[in-house]
Amino acid sequence: MLITFSMKNCFQLLCNHKIPAVGFKNTVKSGVILQSVSNDVYKNLAMEDWIHDHVTLEGKPVLYIWRNAPSVVIGRHQNPWQECNLHLMREEGVKLARRRSGGGTVYHDMGNINLTFFTTKSKYDRMDNLKLIVRALNAVQPQLDVQATKRFDLLLDGQFKISGTASKIGRTAAYHHCTLLCNTDGASLSALLKSPYQGIRSNATASIPSAVKSLLEKDPTLTCEVLIDAVAAEFASYHQVDNHIDLIDPTDETLFPGIHAKARELQSWEWVYGRTPKFSINTTLNVLYEQECLEIKVFIDIKNGRIETCNIEVPDHWLPLEIRDVLNSSFIGSKFCPVETTMLTNILLRTCPGDHKLHSKWSILCEKIKGIM
């Protein structure tokens, strides 16, 4: 059951405020169940951070339920070029986010339910939360065969992954969040979580591919609304809290001071791409130019999302050495992204006006370089 009410009193009671709050002297005897009214991945991740940083969780467990418009979410220590098809994501307007927890890459859409369990550090227990979800699913459909694994996934019929897990453990608080595939677009999931980029060498955490299935494929009555109500009811029963879902707006800066800054950071290029562990690319690009097939070798080191070293080897008869040297040196220090490469290419082309053949070759080469970004 959804209940919209003034969350101000609730959070004045739950939060460890650094500013005076009316009614803060009152005590809260139990936790709450919250659901975001936003479908924006950055705002919903910011809400997670805000709850983790501001809510006093001693004896007050919190369940936070949220869903996102199509987006890909990578783990804190992952490499997006290694994990997903960035080119396809840009074409289809799918957002990329880097969460603060570890773990692998997941695809979110409105057919996926995200569940975040907040507790104190001492009460943190992922398996306990997963068993709660299993009980909720079985309460709705007793015939469902869903089991939690040692990797803290949920498997349907012993083979299809319907939930993946990640977590963050702070000094005193912790959260465990997981997905629940209800009616996710399987074609988009498969296409977007398949990297087309070759020659990447990285020590970043790599995702482990799994066969997946949506619960709605198993039983058409298992809609997102039904599953949300079931999980909320089981959480309420297990933790002895009121069985109602309180709607919250993660854009409300008055209620959640500082949340806009958290969302801006999570959306920034410096966080999404710049926090990628150092990696290198060693690949060969094939270029067809005037009936000639050329091999162009590319060696690039990327640190903090920016090009640290660059060596693009092109046949001397196709592009003069001095032009290649200018190109290589110009890339150093720039962001490893197609937008910045386009800007850089346009600037370099102005240095040799009138040479249309050179312009053509340079443009072809830069388009190929952008293709690995």
Image (cartoon, rainbow, N blue to C red):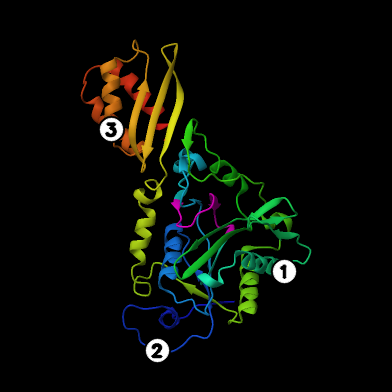
Instruction: Look at the picture and state if 121 lies above or below 15.
Output: above
Q: Position of residue 148 (x, y in %)?
A: 68, 60
Is residue 237 visible in the rendered image? The answer is: yes
Is the magenta region chiefly helix, strand or loop?
loop
What is the secondary structure assignment of the residue under circle 3? Answer: helix
Q: Amino acid at mark 1?
A: Val
Query: Which of marks 2 and 1 precedes in the sequence?
Result: 2
Q: Which mark is residue 25?
A: 2
- Asked which quadrant contains residue 180, the reply is bottom right
Q: Is residue 123 magenta?
A: no
Magenta stretch, residue numbers = 97-112
Q: CA distance from mark 2 to mark 3?
A: 58 Å
Q: Quadrant of the N terminus?
A: bottom right
Q: Position of residue 166 (x, y in %)?
A: 54, 58
What is the secondary structure assignment of the residue under circle 2? Answer: loop
Q: Nearer the viewer, residue 368 or 325?
A: 325
Q: Which residue in the rendered view is the most extreme toward the right?
A: 143
Q: Amino acid at mark 2?
A: Lys
Label 3 belongs to which residue?
Answer: 344
